[in-house]
Image (cartoon, rainbow, N blue to C red):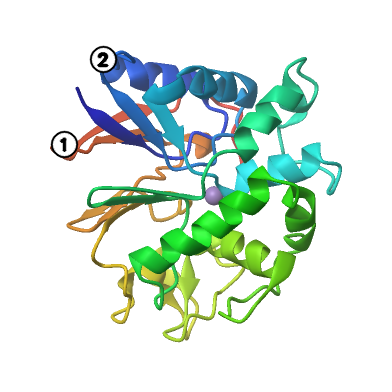
Amino acid sequence: MATYAIGDVQGCFGSLTQLTKTIHFDPKQDRLWFVGDLVNRGPDSLHVLRYIRDLGASALTVLGNHDIFLLAVAAGLTPPRSSDTLTQVLEAPDSRELMQWLRQQPLLYREGDFLLVHAGLLPAWTVEQAEGLAAEAHTAMRGAQCVTTLRALHPSASLQWRPDLTGPVRVATIIKVLTRLRACSNEGVMESSFSGPPDRTPDGFHPWFELSRRRSRTATIIFGHWAAMGLRVTPNILALDTGCVYGRQLTAVRLEDRKIFQVACEETRGQG
Ligand SMILES: [Mn+2]
């Protein structure tokens, strides 16, 4: 019986299949935790979604920015870009059911010492505060506010968190932090466009997990979203986006002993 946390799959179903073989995944005994970004840019998002949904209680995922983007495209709120590979999902006979399933997934999951999130937490947020904020966003995405929330997220560049935000902008900003954060200032101002390696973080900003005043150090945070950083394992950080869709690896960590498992990218279509 083991729990494996897996990095950003982004439609790389062949690599995911290889990885489940490498770890000898047994859905009757083991569990898979996904950091989100199940879809997009890679070749087979449809089978990734179906596979993880069909695992039922043997798998869980948090939502990533590409998963949220897919929901916005499916709702007709934004057109896909040329680098997106979502057509197969959007045109599938079970597309509606998959989108219904996807928007039910949480933005944060906590169990024991572990906290699973796609991107990160602002320095002022305690683990408990982050859980409460993520629950607000989860409720909105599952319910009637899904479309207004998605609409408030596009474009997201200007959204900055403040505790006194209300309505769809509040929910959209929570989602932006949890699914997009890489660098922010000591005061918690998010940098909204940087995606390079952590040692090239723009002046005045820092990787969110390195800020000395970060209040969420009480948990071990498992996240993805930062392919340019790659695998990073410290006592309370497990960063698992190893750029499979960019031709690198898909990574799993067994949480019981922190053993790392990696498979080389099986796909070649991922780019940009
Ligand atoms: Mn991402």
Give left or right: position of 42 versus 36: right
User: Is residue 120 something that shows in the picture?
Assistant: no
What element does badge 1 sit on? Answer: loop
* Residue for point 41% across, 45% down: 241
Front: mark 2 or 1: 1
Label 2: few (<14), some or many (≥20) within 10 Å?
Answer: few
Where residue 81 sits in the image (x, y, percent)? 79, 44
* Residue for point 40% across, 70% down: 207
* Residue for point 29% across, 32% down: 4
Residue 24: assigned label: 2
Quadrant in which the N terminus appears: top left
Amino acid carrying label 2: it is: His
User: Is residue 146 something that shows in the picture?
Assistant: yes
- Look at the picture and state if 66 lies above or below 2: below
The CA span between labels 2 and 1 is 15 Å
> Quick one: label 2 or label 1, which is nearer the N terminus?
2
Where residue 53 sits in the image (x, y, percent)? 53, 23
Q: Is mark 1 within 8 Å of ligand 1?
A: no
- Look at the picture and state if 171 lies above or below 95: below
Amino acid carrying label 1: it is: Glu
Mark 1 and mark 2 in contact (Cβ < 8 Å)?
Answer: no
Residue 256: assigned label: 1
What element does badge 2 sit on? Answer: loop
Tell me where residue 123 sits by quadrant. Answer: bottom left
